């Protein structure tokens, strides 16, 4: 019998598709950590999320209601799953579901389910709508922006910036637009997909660098690793990336975490201009899909988050490997239709 | 005029800038020049070393070295360049 801590971890984000959720990468990090003996419970929204069927990822998966169903129906489902699985730690991995999970955090705590998520205040401070104000308040560089609620407001908003400008959806997606016509087209497309408002933002020319970071909720940065995308899909997602050595970006991540007392994982999306000025483009309130690169580089952020959730005090990581590269790939799994039917019919496998 | 100290150069002439993730392939002459720059050689010393090693006109190496150094600067690989 091993002396390792035996824990049950439930998590979402098993959609390892072309625009992937981080769940599979988070599981890989946790499973790589030799300090735990884990049972992984997947929480999925769709029956075809690849992580449900991948070998060695989840031990069991349950379907959960979409975020639009509200926190009460989510709680009911989690109570059922917890009764069967006795979850020790729960890690939500999607932006759109986080609000419901944060709302449920006190209930989950009563159920003895540990989480390590940002607070509502932290979550809202970095929201696209509030990012400009947040950055200005904390002296971070940020592109100017305007929030618009109708296409008629576009010309006035666009007049504040030179073309090109960026039209961004409420949750995801963005389009670089060279003319008002392109901006109007992007507005309609993004409104149809993500709803209102739409954000019109100044275009910043530079190199996009992302930083995966983990805050302990007391202002300390446990880990921060900058990555440059080497290959980008048509959805703007990294298909390959490399870790960088940049003390300025790590200091920026530390400043962000100190300013917010950030609790949990996050991803800073930065645009670094050719003269070296880093602009905040977005802050994602969860680990990125490329989080396994932090494990490869020597700072296992998913495992560190589990330890923080369980109440351990952690010392910040101090070193990591520069030049570590990830290359994503796609893989056709073969499963029997019965597996899919079973999951679709019963909501668990 | 110095190559950034953190630039990684492999024996095959592959350059990696760990600050911004840029990478470059270089031919044999460029690899030699980069190696000399890493040893803090000045342009005159570099020209002398290249002339000794390769069968090339002095005027050609002078022009090519200037162009190559400018290319390194344009790609933020020299000390004093921001990225």
Image: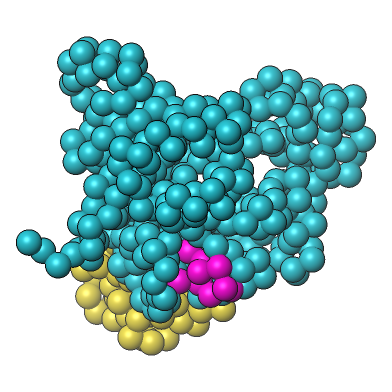
Q: Residue at x 35, y 30 (%)?
A: A62
| Chain drawn in cyan | A
Which residue is at 35% across, 22% downward? A347
User: What chain is colored yellow?
Assistant: B
Task: Compare residues A103 and B74 and report the one nearer the observer.
Answer: A103
Q: Is residue B51 magenta?
A: no
Position in image of residue B38 (x %, y %): 35, 81
Residue A304, placed above or below residue A44 = below
Q: Residue furthest right?
A: A156
Chain part drawn in magenta: A214-222
Q: Note whether residue A148 is visible.
A: yes
Tell me the quarter of the picture where residue A73 sits. top right
**Where on the picture, by quarter, is residue A341?**
top left
Q: Is residue A203 above or below residue A142?
A: above
Instruction: State which quarter of the image contains the N terminus of chain A.
Output: bottom left
Q: Position of residue A272 (x, y in %)?
A: 60, 60
Q: x, y percentage for residue A268?
A: 56, 56
**Residue A74 in the image: above or below residue A26:** above
Image quadrant containing the C terminus of chain A? top left
Q: Is residue B17 visible?
A: no
Q: In terms of depth relative to the viewer, which is nearer, B55 or A163?
A: A163
Please name the residue shown 69% across and 51% down the image.
Answer: A124
| Depth order, front residue of A220/A142 | A220
Q: Position of residue B43 (x, y in %)?
A: 43, 82
Image quadrant assignment for residue B15: bottom left
Q: Is residue A41 left or right of residue A238?
A: left
Residue A324 placement, left or right of A264 = left
């Amino acid at each position: 019998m091993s002396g390792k801590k035996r824990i049950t971890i439930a998590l979402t984000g098993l959609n390892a598709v072309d625009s992937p959720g981080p769940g599979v990468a988070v599981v890989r990090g946790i499973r790589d950590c030799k300090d735990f003996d884990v049972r992984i419970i997947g929480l999925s929204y769709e029956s075809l999320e690849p992580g449900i069927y991948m070998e060695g990822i989840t031990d069991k998966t349950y379907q959960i209601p979409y975020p639009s169903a509200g926190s009460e129906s989510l709680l009911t489902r989690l109570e059922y799953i917890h009764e069967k699985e006795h979850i020790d730690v729960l890690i939500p991995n999607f932006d759109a579901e986080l609000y419901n999970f944060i709302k449920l955090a006190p209930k989950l705590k009563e159920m003895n389910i540990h989480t390590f998520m940002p607070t509502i205040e932290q979550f809202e401070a970095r929201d696209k709508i509030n990012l400009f104000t947040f950055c200005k308040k904390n002296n971070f560089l940020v592109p100017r922006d305007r929030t618009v609620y109708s296409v008629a407001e576009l010309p006035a908003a666009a007049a504040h910036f030179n073309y090109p400008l960026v039209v961004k959806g409420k949750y995801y997606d963005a389009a670089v637009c060279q003319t008002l016509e392109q901006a109007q087209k992007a507005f309609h497309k993004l409104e149809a997909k993500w709803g209102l408002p739409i954000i019109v933002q100044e275009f910043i020319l530079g190199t996009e660098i992302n930083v995966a970071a983990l805050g302990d909720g007391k202002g300390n940065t446990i880990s921060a690793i900058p990555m440059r995308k080497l290959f980008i899909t048509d959805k703007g997602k990294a298909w390959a990336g490399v870790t960088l050595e940049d003390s300025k970006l790590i200091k920026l991540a530390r400043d962000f975490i100190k300013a917010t007392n950030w609790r949990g994982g996050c991803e800073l999306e930065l645009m670094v201009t050719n003269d070296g000025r880093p602009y905040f483009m977005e802050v994602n309130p969860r680990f990125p899909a490329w989080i396994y690169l932090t494990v490869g580089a020597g700072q296992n952020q998913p495992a560190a988050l589990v330890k923080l959730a369980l109440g351990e005090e952690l010392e910040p990581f101090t070193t990591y490997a520069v030049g570590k590269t990830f290359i994503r790939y796609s893989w056709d799994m073969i499963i029997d239709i019965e597996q899919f039917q079973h999951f679709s019919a019963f909501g668990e496998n | 005029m110095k190559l950034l100290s953190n630039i990684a150069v492999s024996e095959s002439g592959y350059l990696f800038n760990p600050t911004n993730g840029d990478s470059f392939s270089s031919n044999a002459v460029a690899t030699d020049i980069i190696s000399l720059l890493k040893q803090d050689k000045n342009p005159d010393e570099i020209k002398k070393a290249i002339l000794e090693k390769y069968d090339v006109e002095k005027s050609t190496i002078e022009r090519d070295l200037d162009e190559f150094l400018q290319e390194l600067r344009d790609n933020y690989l020299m000390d004093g360049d921001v990225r």
